[in-house]
Image (cartoon, rainbow, N blue to C red):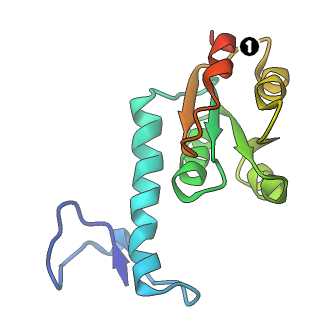
Amino acid sequence: MVAIVPEGYATSAIAAVETVFAKPDGLSFVEAAAFPVAAEVGYRTMLQLSVSAGDVVVINGAGGPAGSAAAQFGARFGAQVIGIVGRSTFDWMQNIGAIPVEYGDGVVERVAVVGWPRGVDALLDCAGRGNLAGVGRHRR
């Protein structure tokens, strides 16, 4: 079992049943332990960016652990999420409620086509490539 327990540094813990879930068979214990970390990073980032219904949010690296969690939470909050990802991730992005945009040369222009004329309310760079600076021109 895996649990999300704030500040829990022990070999065992007592947790409410709604905070615990079974470790997926395909994951090692290390991978399963990391999963809630990415989910919390995505959740807290959307809160810190004050993402709400109707916002346009651009997430670079939306196919990775923290980025995909942020994309899911952003969509759940009612935002229009634009996920910058590789083409192989497009179907999955659409399934979680995000609009996929392929990374690489011309990404700023592709994001502008999707997010404009409304503009962009929040930017999140989970890839750390620094290529979102041009997207800021399209910020509301």
What residue is shown at x 59% (from left), y 40% (from top)? Answer: 129
The furthest residue to the bottom: 25
Note whether residue 87 is visible: yes
Q: In the figure, residue 3 lies in which quadrant?
A: bottom left
Q: Which residue is at the front of the view, 69 or 138? A: 138
Q: In the figure, residue 92 lies in which quadrant?
A: bottom right
**Could you say where residue 44 lies in the image, as x and y percent from the top left?**
39, 42
What residue is shown at x 70% (from left), y 52% (from top)? Answer: 96
Above or below residue 58? Residue 102 is: below
The quarter of the image holding the N terminus is bottom left
**Could you say where residue 66 lies in the image, as x and y percent from the top left?**
51, 53
Q: Secondary structure at mark 1?
A: loop
Image-based side of 114 in relation to 137, left or right: right
**Could you say where residue 21 lies in the image, as x and y percent from the top left?**
43, 77
Q: Residues within 10 Å of mark 1 (few under 14, many from 20)?
A: few
Note whether residue 79 is visible: no
Above or below residue 107? Residue 36 is: below
**Could you say where residue 76 lies in the image, as x and y percent from the top left?**
59, 43
Image-based side of 120 in relation to 22, left or right: right
- Specify the amino acid type for callout 1: Arg
What residue is shown at x 72% (from left), y 41% (from top)? Answer: 84
Above or below residue 112? Residue 61 is: below
The quarter of the image holding the C terminus is top right
What residue is shown at x 84% (from left), y 28% (from top)? Answer: 110
In this figure, which residue is indicated by the disc labeled 1? 118
